[in-house]
Structures are given as C-alpha cells and as structure tokens.
Image (tube, grey):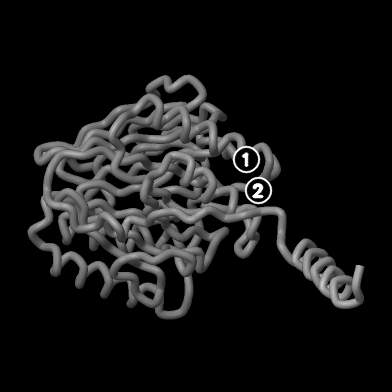
C-alpha cells in the first residue's frame, strides 16, 4: 500500500470511528403533522385519540415502546379510514430525551397518520419539534379539519399563560365562528376522577377560567389527559351538570406506561370512570350531526365506553 493510500485509509477509519461514537443508536423517523391536511372541507371523518403515551415512564422505555406500537397497530387494524392521530400531552416521560422521543415518533410513523400533538407537563416545549399551524408563543395552536375547529391548549403554568390562552381562544373562535363543531384539547383536566391529582393550579385554571370560556364560545367536546385513567364527565356548564353542557373526557394511557387509581367515592360531575390497567385508545367519528366517541382497551379492542354529542 502506498503512503498516499495508507493515509486515506487512516483518515477514513478515523472518520468512521468518530461518527460511530458521535451518532446515537436511535433514529427518529419523520412524521407528517396535522398542518399537512388542515383546512380540509367539511364532511364525515374519524380520528384516533391517545391519552399520555409518556414513553420511558414506570415500565421502562423498551416496554413502553412495545406497548405503544402494539396499541396503535391493534387500533388501526380494527378501525379503518382514520384521518389523523391526536395526543393529549405527555408524549414522553423526560423532556429532551431523544430515545424516548424517537420511540414515540416510531409509533406514529408505524401507522402512517398525521400527528396532532399536545404539550404536557412532562414534555414542555415538545411542540417546538413540529411544524404546526397557527401556533402562538405559549404553545397553543388551532386548525380546522372537516369543518371542525380543534383548539389545542398548553395548560402548563408560566407567567402570562392565562392571558395568552384567553386571547388565543377568543381570536381562534372568532376567526372560525362558522365551524360546525369545536373541540378543545389540553393536558391538565378541568374535571377528573382522581381528587389527589385534581388539586393543581393548572387544573384550577382549566376549570374556573378556560371551562367558562368554552361555554361562551360554544365548545362541544373537551379532551384531556394527565390522570392515566379513563373518565367522562356529565355535560358541564357553569360548573354544574347540564344537558346542554360540555362533556370532558380524560383519556387513559395509549402505551400503558403508567396507571393511576381512580377515586372510588362519588364525584358529582363524573358519569363514567374506569381503570383497566391496559393501554387504551379512543376513536371519534364526526358527522355534521354528531360526534361519537368509542373508547377501547387495545389488547382486545373491547369497547369500554361510548358517548355521542348530537346537534
């Protein structure tokens, strides 16, 4: 081997070793976001909803990844023609953990659905990783699909958050005042079935600031997370059950990464609650006259709860 060839080979070997040490073992796949399909004209459609995947929580990343992949595979195998996947926050357990984020995106990519994520308390600033429509400086964003206005809120506390979110809701609702349906999506629940996890400032704000605004703006359905169990409130208006009110649905974990107990005693505003301790997902069917929610445990795809909001 000539000196020149030996030198080139040595440089190549050093480059291979350097990149091998520098590159992590994970590889985050690219996914399509809701921005790519937002604005589609009114019509009937269905979408998939997941409570906190929170990959990398109590079971460890490997188990959570398997649970997430299996849950999504079973749901999409059972339910056809889903338009997109919506999450209600805590997509990963540790903000900035690239392996957890890659595993989360791997699940999304495996079912080839556009993603509509929401920010949770475990993954602040996660929305900075995505190109999302109409996003403000606090991480609230909105879009329309099939004549439905979706309002994703960042329910985490920071200075000025309430004022930003109130303005966001008012302006988005005004711009889309002709929307056939309005769905609010946020992480910390306004109404939940676990008292010990329902005493935070974020939940206080959700119930006593944002919920009255939802009433005023004509929101039809609220989707929540954080509690790692399933619960559905009675239709609520001005903090009391009311036939013309808004049902608040808390989604259980889509991966099975963590489960919290439900509060067994009577809660005046809860209509349905359960903790199957298996991964759960929900499908929402949208027509001009109804929103139909179907919640399933994804190991067997047994239906656990159904509810319909009608015009």
> What SS does tag 1 mark?
helix
Whether pointer 2 and pointer 1 mark residues with C-beta atoms closer than 8 Å, the reply is yes
Which residue is tagged 2?
56
Q: Quadrant of the C terminus?
A: top left
Disc on res. 129: none
Left or right: 58 as drawn, with respect to 143: right
Left or right: 130 as drawn, with respect to 166: right
Q: Earlier in the sequence, mark 2 or mark 1?
A: 2
Q: Is residue 52 above or below residue 217?
A: above
Q: Quadrant of the N terminus?
A: bottom right
Which residue is tagged 1?
64
Residue drawn at (14%, 68%) of the image: 174
Residue drawn at (36%, 73%) of the image: 162
> What SS does tag 2 mark?
loop
Q: Number of labelled discs?
A: 2
Give the residue at the far front of this rendering. 2
Using a 10 Å C-alpha cutoff, classify the residue at mark 2 as few (fewer than 14 neighbours), some (14 to 19) or many (20 or more). Answer: many
Residue 168: x %, y % from top left: 27, 71
Residue 8: x %, y % from top left: 82, 73
Using a 10 Å C-alpha cutoff, classify the residue at mark 1 as few (fewer than 14 neighbours), some (14 to 19) or many (20 or more). Answer: many
Residue drawn at (47%, 35%) of the image: 72
Q: CA distance from mark 2 to mark 1?
A: 6 Å
Q: Is residue 165 above or below residue 108?
A: below
Residue drawn at (23%, 35%) of the image: 285
Q: Is residue 218 above or below residue 111?
A: below
Question: Residue 163 sits in which quadrant?
Answer: bottom left
Left or right: 298 as drawn, with respect to 270: right
Residue 274: x %, y % from top left: 46, 29
Nearest to the observer: residue 257 or residue 211: 257
Question: Residue 291 sits in which quadrant?
Answer: top left
Residue 185: x %, y % from top left: 34, 54
């Amino acid at each position: 081997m000539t000196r020149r060839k030996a030198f080139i080979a040595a440089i190549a070997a050093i480059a291979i070793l350097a990149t091998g040490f520098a590159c992590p073992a994970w590889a985050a796949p690219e996914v399509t976001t809701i921005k790519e399909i937002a604005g589609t004209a009114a019509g009937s459609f269905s979408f998939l909803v997941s409570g906190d995947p929170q990959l990398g929580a109590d079971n460890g990343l490997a188990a959570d990844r398997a649970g997430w992949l299996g849950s999504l595979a079973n749901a999409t195998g059972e339910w056809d023609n889903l338009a997109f996947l919506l999450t209600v926050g805590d997509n990963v357990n540790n903000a900035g953990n690239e392996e957890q984020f890659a595993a989360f995106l791997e699940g999304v990519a495996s079912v080839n659905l556009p993603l509509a994520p929401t920010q949770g308390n475990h993954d602040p600033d996660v929305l900075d990783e995505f190109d999302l429509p109409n996003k403000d400086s606090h991480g609230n964003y909105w879009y329309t699909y099939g004549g439905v206005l979706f309002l994703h809120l960042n329910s985490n506390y920071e200075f000025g958050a309430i004022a930003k979110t109130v303005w966001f809701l008012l302006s988005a609702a005004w711009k889309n005042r002709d929307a056939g349906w309005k769905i609010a999506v946020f992480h910390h629940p306004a109404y939940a079935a676990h008292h010990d996890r329902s005493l935070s400032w974020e939940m206080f704000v959700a119930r006593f600031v944002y919920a009255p605004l939802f009433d005023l703006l004509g929101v039809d359905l609220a989707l929540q997370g954080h509690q790692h169990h399933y619960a559905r409130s009675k239709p609520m208006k001005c903090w009391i059950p009311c036939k013309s009110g808004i049902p608040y649905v808390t989604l259980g974990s889509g991966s099975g990464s963590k489960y919290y107990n439900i509060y067994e005693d009577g809660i005046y505003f809860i209509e349905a609650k359960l903790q199957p301790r298996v991964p759960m997902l929900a499908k929402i069917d949208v027509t001009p006259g109804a929103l139909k929610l179907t919640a399933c445990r994804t190991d067997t795809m047994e239906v656990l709860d159904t509810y319909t909001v009608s015009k």
